[in-house]
Amino acid sequence: MKCFLFILTSCTCLLINSPASADDLPLSEASAECIDCHSSIHPGIVSGWQQSRHAMVTPQKAMAVKGVARKVSSTTVPEGLQTVVVGCAECHTLRPKAHADTFEHNGYDVHVVVSPDDCQTCHATEREQYAKNIMAHAYGNLANNSLHQKHEHAILAATKFVNGKMTQSSANDATRAEACLYCHGTKLVLAGSETRDTEAAGELEFPIIKGWPNQGVGRINLDGSMGACSACHTRHSFSIEIARKPYTCKECHVGPDVPAYKVYAASKHGNIYSSKHADWDFKSVPWTIGQDFTAPTCATCHISLLVNTDDEVVVERTHQMNNRLPWRILGLIYAHPHPLKPDTSIIRNKDGLPLPTDLDGGFASKYLIDEKEMEARKQAMQAACLNCHDTSWVNGHWQRLENTIKETNAQTLTATRIMQDIWKRGLANRQDNPYDEAIEKKWSSTWLFYSNTIRFASSMAGGGDYGVFAGGRYQLSQTLLELNDWLELQKKLDAASKK
Amino acid sequence: MKCFLFILTSCTCLLINSPASADDLPLSEASAECIDCHSSIHPGIVSGWQQSRHAMVTPQKAMAVKGVARKVSSTTVPEGLQTVVVGCAECHTLRPKAHADTFEHNGYDVHVVVSPDDCQTCHATEREQYAKNIMAHAYGNLANNSLHQKHEHAILAATKFVNGKMTQSSANDATRAEACLYCHGTKLVLAGSETRDTEAAGELEFPIIKGWPNQGVGRINLDGSMGACSACHTRHSFSIEIARKPYTCKECHVGPDVPAYKVYAASKHGNIYSSKHADWDFKSVPWTIGQDFTAPTCATCHISLLVNTDDEVVVERTHQMNNRLPWRILGLIYAHPHPLKPDTSIIRNKDGLPLPTDLDGGFASKYLIDEKEMEARKQAMQAACLNCHDTSWVNGHWQRLENTIKETNAQTLTATRIMQDIWKRGLANRQDNPYDEAIEKKWSSTWLFYSNTIRFASSMAGGGDYGVFAGGRYQLSQTLLELNDWLELQKKLDAASKK
Amino acid sequence: MKCFLFILTSCTCLLINSPASADDLPLSEASAECIDCHSSIHPGIVSGWQQSRHAMVTPQKAMAVKGVARKVSSTTVPEGLQTVVVGCAECHTLRPKAHADTFEHNGYDVHVVVSPDDCQTCHATEREQYAKNIMAHAYGNLANNSLHQKHEHAILAATKFVNGKMTQSSANDATRAEACLYCHGTKLVLAGSETRDTEAAGELEFPIIKGWPNQGVGRINLDGSMGACSACHTRHSFSIEIARKPYTCKECHVGPDVPAYKVYAASKHGNIYSSKHADWDFKSVPWTIGQDFTAPTCATCHISLLVNTDDEVVVERTHQMNNRLPWRILGLIYAHPHPLKPDTSIIRNKDGLPLPTDLDGGFASKYLIDEKEMEARKQAMQAACLNCHDTSWVNGHWQRLENTIKETNAQTLTATRIMQDIWKRGLANRQDNPYDEAIEKKWSSTWLFYSNTIRFASSMAGGGDYGVFAGGRYQLSQTLLELNDWLELQKKLDAASKK
């Protein structure tokens, strides 16, 4: 009889998720008009949306859900939107005056780029949390930091080799959009309009948007807001299933600078995910540990609302992804306590540089969270761990992570001491740009890639290979020796030239 | 009621795909004899075939299908083959005189290696298209290009270190078969025969085939034909499902020289594929955008026949994979318009070298497609994009790709200028072999790996990490500086030695 | 009607696998007490176990299974355990006196770390085989080998740069546990006890275990046994499905030192697995080729009991994973016949070093398996291959693998000859530690990474990119040249300084 029950359960789910008749799916007149043309012109967009929850539920119904199963966090939604499903027009005609890219399109004031300030109409809490997330500020944190600008330049600069000299000039906007800003987000700017001859409706006018397309986490939108919900909630299905799977995070977190996905995929957690996730429920809200899933994905530890099998809330949902993270282990020279504010361009270390540590590894504590907040974030993270691991396991894991942070910071200090000696001797030029010479890149790879990969391996229990041979301690120790050898060689050459 | 309908639909599919009785699956006497023994000896082969479409449909039935759902492109199929399913004997005894490896086996003239010229019996159009595909010529494009031969030698050569000198000698055939030719295809040669004592039938004679096994895309077969359909249509299931999934392309397109799979897997497209493909239909012909799948795989953009939800053909099927590609972005020093003909060994640049560009990046235009053809191919590719993206999105994407091509070609020119200076000064020997010294390999990694990876990231919207830190602009900029530093060091050493 | 049959089949399976009533699932009183508290405290652990076979079958029932379907290999199981399912207490209170970490917990003598000697209660054969597996000795094979200790030190050492000199000191235990020992296994040591205030039961005392947590394959347990079954049989589901999927092996076999997973994932076998495994049966015992699966995973070739579709045993199950392996292709300077005994720390080469070859590549044959045993292991492996490939295919494949072994050993000899010249000239110090200088690391990367990756590509038919461009022959040839160039540079500098 189990089989019969199983089928019944499945049917029930289907019935809950997909209202049975069109009466239950009231589409606004405006959205119906959109779909009329666009279902032929852009079948992929329309069918993506049709499979989305937005196409299946009105805000009114969604707001009627009580307790932790509720997905719409706003307490009020404008009346006109409450009783229709969330169609094309509901988002793309919201707040027309706020969007610089609003244009007249078949009688409607439509904007191309839907922004977090549009989404907050229904999802106010998530939008508010995300604004405090360092990721929302990813554009400015790069663009408004003079040192990071030098680093970007050192990586992207156009080069020439003329008369035996190599020269560098600034990368153009298209290159910048394909590189750092692909993930950080571009700054969208309205650059005029153009007329295009369309198949469906003849000549139409459309806005030209510099920086488009882009789905970076800190995109500067045409209403001035920061962020792109679509970075994770893939348009136009906006699927919670996709956002909860690790491939979403992988889009930006896969390279040696932030190898989260690679480490996860080689961890015990990643193994269980890969082996078993076909049996899990990625749509359930709240997400029940041990029932909906048996090992964490990225979202489990960093974002999702988790309940245990007694329906008790284990961890609250957060879209300020770093608030279960005491330490910031990537991107900068040394691991350090997380920045206090999401705008990190305001940080100054004791030498006045826009860095969260000084070159000796000392913390710019004024701009970073304090020990109390670090402890609170640790507790928030461990609250998830403790559902599948006992206290001694979790403590043992955490002590090793903190040891790894100390260890890699100490190794980075060694690399930096050598680099400082090189700068002091005038063998490389720090003042101009500390990142743009070959030997400086060797130095930056010790912390940007190797120390970093080692820390990811420790933090995610990702183990051996990423901690040792795959961009880990093997490469770190080798690069330290090569930095030192380079310095020795230069000294030797110097001595030889002085003979 | 949805549930009930769902089950009905599933049943219907099953009934269509798998004829219910043996009467509908007429097996030739010859194939029945094969299976008699081989189902015990090679259960994996036989069960693979049993699950294949070949085992389930006769050519006659397949040819009765009208319109875009038809899978058999030949207009005529020899009568003897029409009313039996496509079993072992149907392929392995075809055209016995054409195959050098045909041998007497239990009363049949059997050949080991089934070739595209066998497959064209039913799949004439695909075979014809594939012959025009540069991949069909992958063996000769390597073996008949004197410069590429030098590159292969520089990578595979056997080395010795005797009396303080390192020497290189040619790699043997087995090494070559395991290296470049693994993907490019080996040249199969009949090398005699051997008697083996078999469990099932005592002593039997079998051909010995040099270069076997191999499934490279440009394999030279024993009937003189080029290519291996099994490279993608994995034997013996010949599954369209497998061919359409990205893991097939990954077999050859995963390394830093052609990181298509890695970039795809980290792109938004790859994320959607990984998250959702369990719900997609990979067997449907034609393949309906938004219904059968909601994000492209490799096959979607490069090969498959696509229709929209109105059953209109959006892009035609092609087995000349490059005919939706205006640019060739991999493998050579500079990105360039695609070669006009699939045999690229005939190309000569202005300096007489078998390269599609000269060392300064100028195109050997006579041998490459012209702007009109480039435009046509761009339109063919964009026809797929436009189903899920509007024109401004697609244009924005394409402009960035073309910018990336210019950018990386310019960076490669810088690397090459430094290399030319090195050659000119006699610090490396270009004439002998431009690829076989350490510094030459550093140069070739700038275009073969890094510029190339950056272009793949741009072309496939694969984004940040592969465009920057994972074999992208970080490594490219570092290697440019290292090339320059090496030259400076040599100058310094030279000066020191002359003192 | 197929549909109906399909559903019936599924139901039947469910009924067989999951006894319908609680009467069939007799839980011991002790385990019931555990679950009482821990289902709330550790829902992930309890639900993992509830989905496991251990929770569904009593040893008595499991032992009643006849023939190759039997999973419990012990012929006798203590009476008290026979008629209850394998719950928490059944494992965690076994042999209390043998475990140093046994502690009083709510009236029971509980130990934290379940060991292979506990598991052997039911799985005697597997435990016995695994004890002969080189992996069981992974801790001592590293810790008791003076040369490997030097290598570990060279990779993990803490460094400082003071007064222009770089110094190294030993890594601490936490770093070692996060690095090599993460996979090899830590040595667990009872280090006292601590009182923790628990939510469920107030103050309780728990053991403190140094080296915990760890699931390395050669972990030294608190009962003195070696190994962790949970390394592959992931706690607490102990799922054969997970163990048979390649992600389990990937946890330790993914880096450039042992790129098995990467090579597999890019091979034809891996392609078929990735494309089709959702349709396979990973729980069936025995595992039927062509029916339960159509391409091998790691477990298929190295561990599992395989039968063909005639129910004939093709290969016996083994937990001595290396007994289908004639050659050991990873980790050491040269590929060599597999060690005779799992404790490799006893090996001495002709120069008295604890290595299976001398520096010239000669085998320490006394400690390695002989040709007869190599042949037997080759036959055992090929017995699996031959189900899907004919003899000429398998022979061709194997000849290439053996050619690759010879080729890469020869290339490694070249690298070593250069290194020996460097040592002889005093340009690096071998005596002290042959692995801890930058140039020595360049040398070790030729064999530890590149020759190794090339061999994996050949052995697993993983083909082109891993054999050439992705840590293969391209990088090997480049590194050989760089070693040679470095030596030449030093000679030149030497000459200059002597002028």
Image: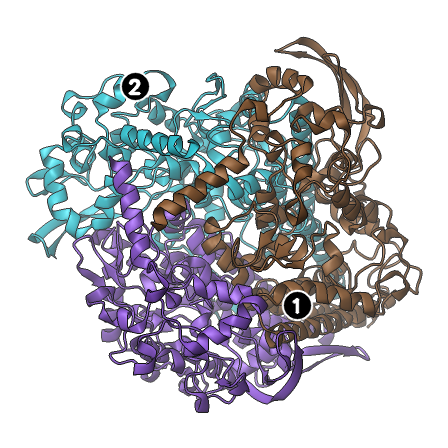
Chain colours: A purple, B brown, C cyan
Could you tell me if residue C385 is visible in this image? no
Residue B417: give x, y in percent of width and height.
Answer: 80, 71
Q: Amino acid at mark 1?
A: Leu
Q: Quadrant of the C terminus of chain A?
A: bottom right
The disc numbered 1 marks a residue on which chain?
A: B
Residue C468: give x, y in percent of width and height.
Answer: 68, 47
Residue A455's label in the rendered image is: none
> Label 2 belongs to which residue?
C65
Side of C103 relative to C385 (left or right): left
Residue B476's label in the rendered image is: 1
| Of marks 1 and 2, the one in the foreground | 2
Residue C439: give x, y in percent of width and height.
Answer: 62, 55
Q: Amino acid at mark 2?
A: Val
Q: Residue at x 69, y 43 (%)?
A: C417
- Badge 2: residue crowd in 10 Å (few <14, some 14–19, many ≥20): few
Report, in whole angstroms, how far the alpha carbon at label 1 lies from the one at label 2.
61 Å
Q: Nearer the viewer, residue B182 or C6?
A: C6
* Residue positioned most to the top: B202
- Badge 1: residue crowd in 10 Å (few <14, some 14–19, many ≥20): many
Side of A477 relative to A120 (left or right): right
- Residue B104: quarter of image: top right
